[in-house]
Each structure stands twice: as C-alpha cells, then as structure tokens.
Amino acid sequence: MSNVENTNQKETIRVVKIGGNVVDNPEALEAFLVDFQKLEGKKVLVHGGGVMASKMAIDLGIKTTMIQGRRVTDAETLKLVAMVYAGWINKHIVALLQKDGCNAIGLSGVDANIIPAARRSPIPIDFGFVGDPTPSKVNAEFISDLLDKDIVPVFCAITHDEKGSLLNTNADTIAYTLSVALSSKYKTILYYCFEKEGVLRNVDDPKSIILSMTKSEYESHLKQNIIAGGMIPKLHNSFNAIDEGVSEVLVMHANNLLTQKGTRLINENGTIK
Amino acid sequence: MSNVENTNQKETIRVVKIGGNVVDNPEALEAFLVDFQKLEGKKVLVHGGGVMASKMAIDLGIKTTMIQGRRVTDAETLKLVAMVYAGWINKHIVALLQKDGCNAIGLSGVDANIIPAARRSPIPIDFGFVGDPTPSKVNAEFISDLLDKDIVPVFCAITHDEKGSLLNTNADTIAYTLSVALSSKYKTILYYCFEKEGVLRNVDDPKSIILSMTKSEYESHLKQNIIAGGMIPKLHNSFNAIDEGVSEVLVMHANNLLTQKGTRLINENGTIK
C-alpha cells in the first residue's frame, strides 16, 4: 500500500510515440499535433519516419533492406535517416508545435548525450549502424530540467555510440527507453499512436479491438496466434516498460489521443502502478 | 572608464562559425572540432553546410539557384537544407564532439524558439523560405542555461517564422545574431572560421592578410576595391556585431582557431570592449 501511495504522489508524464504512416500524411500529422499540444501536464513526443525515409531512399537510389521489419543501416542509409528523422521531420514537427504556442525542442539521442546506445552485434544479423539504448543510461535529468521550464522535448529515433558515430534506433524502442528512464521520477504513461484502433483480434476489423491486456493474457494470445506479427515488438516493448516501472501503455489510433480509446496494457494485477 | 570596468567583469563567450567548405571535408572538420573542444570557457558553435546541400541537390535533381551568393529556397530546397543542415551535419558534429567528451547539443532556431525570424519580403528579390532574425528576439536565457550546465550549443542555420514554417538563414547571420544576443550578458568574441587566412588584400596571396581593421578602415578599403566580393557580407555582419555590443570579431583559417591568427576586427578606438 505504501508503494502505491508513493507512486500516486509522483507527477504524471505522458510519453507519446507517433508512427511513420501518420508522420508521412500532412493532414493527419497536423491534426495529431493539435491534439498533442492540448494534452495537459508534462509530455514528450517521439516520432518515427520510416515511410518518408524509404521514399527518400528511392529518390537517392539507395537500396532499402529490411530484415524482420527492421531497416539495415549501412553508412549511406545512416546519413539518410539522420537527414530525414533529425532534419526535416523533427524540425518540421517542432515548427508546427511552436506555431500553436507549444514550446517544443527537437532532440536526438546524441544531443546532450541524452540517449547513448550500444551498436548492435553483427551476429546473428548485421543490421549495420543500429543502436540499442539502455534506460538506465538516459540523461533523464536533462529532460526533466526542460520539462520544468515548460519545454516539450520532441525526439527522433537517432542515438549514438559515444565513439563518434550516430546510430539508427527503432522509434518504438526510443519511446520505451525514455518512458522507463522517466518512470523513476514520474508516473509515466506511454502512448503508441499509429493508424490502427489498437491491438485487434482480426487485423482487418477495427471493431475486434482488445480493450485491455495483461502480460499473461498477451502471452496466451501469442500462443493462439491472435496477435499479428507487426504488433509483437510493440507489445514486447510495452510489457517490458510496465515490468520496468511504466504505469500503463496505450496502443491507439493517432486520432484518439484525447479520447484515450485504444488497447490498454496493464500490469498483472490489473491495477495501474 | 567605468564602462570598460563593467564589461571586463563579464564572463567571456566565444561564438565560433565554421564554413561549409570545412564542414564538407571530413579530415578538416575532425581536426577543427578537436581544436574547438580545446577552447576554454563558454562557447557556441555555428556551422554552415551549403557545399553539401548543393551536392545533395544534384543527387535529388533539385535545381540550385543562387542570387548574390545566397540560396533561393523553394519548398523542396527548404526540405533539403533542413535535412542536410539540421539532420546530418548538425548531429554528425555533435556525435564527434561527444566522442571527445564535449557535451554538445545540436539546435536550430526553431528549437525552444531560440531564433525566430521574419520571412524576407519577396521584393525586390524573392529568395523564398529565407528568414532574417533579430538579435533582440533570441532566447539568450535558454542558451545561457545550457552553458551554465557545461553544455555546448551547436547551431545549424535553420530558423522559423513562428507560423509553422522553417526558414533557411545564412550561417554567418546566425553567428552574428547569436553573438549580439549574448553580448548583453557576456564579453563576446565572434570567430568566422573558413578556408582562408583572413581578410586578404590579394585573394590569391595568403601573406597579404590584413591583421586588423576598424569600420572606417573597412569602408576605406571598400572604396578602393581592396575587399573581395564574397568577404563583404561577412565584414558587414562583423562590424554590425561590433556596433551592437560584440567585443571583437576574428576572421581566420579554421586551422588557426587556437593560435588566433587572422584578421582582427575591432571598434573605432582600437580597444576591445
């Protein structure tokens, strides 16, 4: 009981991740950002951009190789994703938020060494310049200082190896990493916003949404092949986040950020930490 | 006398601008950054990137139009320069500084609304999405807070109009704007580093360097056509900076940052404010 009380005293922070399909649609992105800036309290935005990166790769004649849904990042592709994620998308989002009076700041993991990462081993699969961050190494104090000044950090999915090289990191992983890192100070809610209603029993039927799920329910769904392949890493990240201190995770359509309609992922007791 | 004493009590800050030709040369850039991180005291880096932007424009089939040495920025070119300046170059420089233990943060003018700008009038020349910032509107307090935490801000030459659009801004102008804005709090020295020894009487002879210059000497050189065309906007910015509170401006080769060899631009009395 004392644990719950302690946690309840913490201020709430919302870590919101918006996916590449929404980012690539100007109207959807603008509408989402209008909702995002209406979210009350402390908040952090994390954005993807893979759809735009793949398009730009075609324009530049760079071959896109995906393995298990992850981009293989050679030196040329690293430059490309740094340009697209940290350059255009990140600063464009910040400009749109600033227009609406939301004092945003665009950041990557290399800035102020906020998210250092380890370059992934080339064995068994060589993903190239891809980084895996560790929540305990995040410079959460720097983020917290920004939040205390009513500045809203907007993160792209670029980290670095502390040896001079940028690294490409999955945006869902950035959102997981930041939310775990912030959960020691804040009651943290993680939102995965994308172009589906939530976790669906039938991927083609938006009404088949699963409204809430614990980790053991997730594992049971997995065994029954109820969860679609693309959703598995997102849910894996989500339940890890909950295990490591995040209060709850919402998987939802980008249009539903304010109504909070979606799939609620919670801890085993069904209570929110 | 009391003025001089007051100014002497101010802490020194160095605003260092590094040009696109150096940025585009990996060895020259790395060597420059090693020197930059050795500079003692508070410092800010501003980088160009025009050379790389022009190359990338060719790769993407985007036409580069320059008028009076300035890039005409249509919507496609704006996206390109945001990608190249704020994306690859900015984050790559920050990664290299972090490697050497310099806690850098990459920023553009849109971040935390540090450098708002007015979109330039299309009359007499329509430069497109080009922004002119005003030193008094710079969020110098935010920069100062970073510096107090031993964080080194690294600026690319992207600003915004506060209406949702990014703007392309000349990097020399960003350095001028930041140095004037910081001069109310700090004794500010502005360094323009590029691939020449300084201001030369004969552009082909590195030994023809002019070691120091006041504004009236500059105007007299101008009348005698001693100053080369490309140098005029840089010197114009420099003397404006000195008029508006900057202590001195050094125009120098990127290799000479630590030796401080170059052309020293000073106020009319020959004293440093």
Image (cartoon, coloured by chain):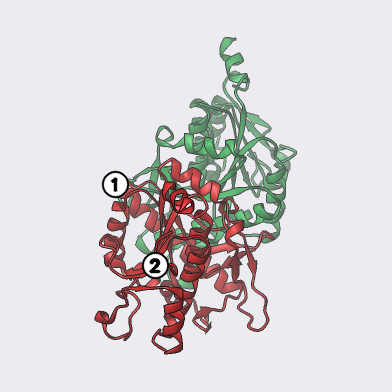
Chain colours: A red, B green
Horizontal side of A207 relative to A180 (left or right) equals left
Residue lying farthest to the top in this orientation: B1
Q: Which mark is residue A270?
A: 2
Residue B168 on image: x %, y %: 42, 52
Q: Is residue B189 visible?
A: yes
Q: Residue at x 56, y 28 (%)?
A: B186
Q: Nearer the viewer, residue B51 or B168?
A: B168
Residue drawn at x 65%, y 42% as measured from the top left: B202
Find residue B123 and name its label. 1
Chain letter behind tag 1: B
A171 vs B262: above or below: below
**Disc 1 and disc 2 in contact, CB within 8 angstroms:** no
Q: Secondary structure at mark 1?
A: loop
On residue B20, the disc is: none
The disc labelled 1 sits on which kind of residue? Answer: Ile
The answer to whether residue A83 is visible is no
Secondary structure beneath label 2: loop
Q: Is residue B273 above or below residue A129?
A: above
Above or below: residue A226 compared with residue B120: below
Q: Which is nearer the eye, B88 or B119?
A: B88
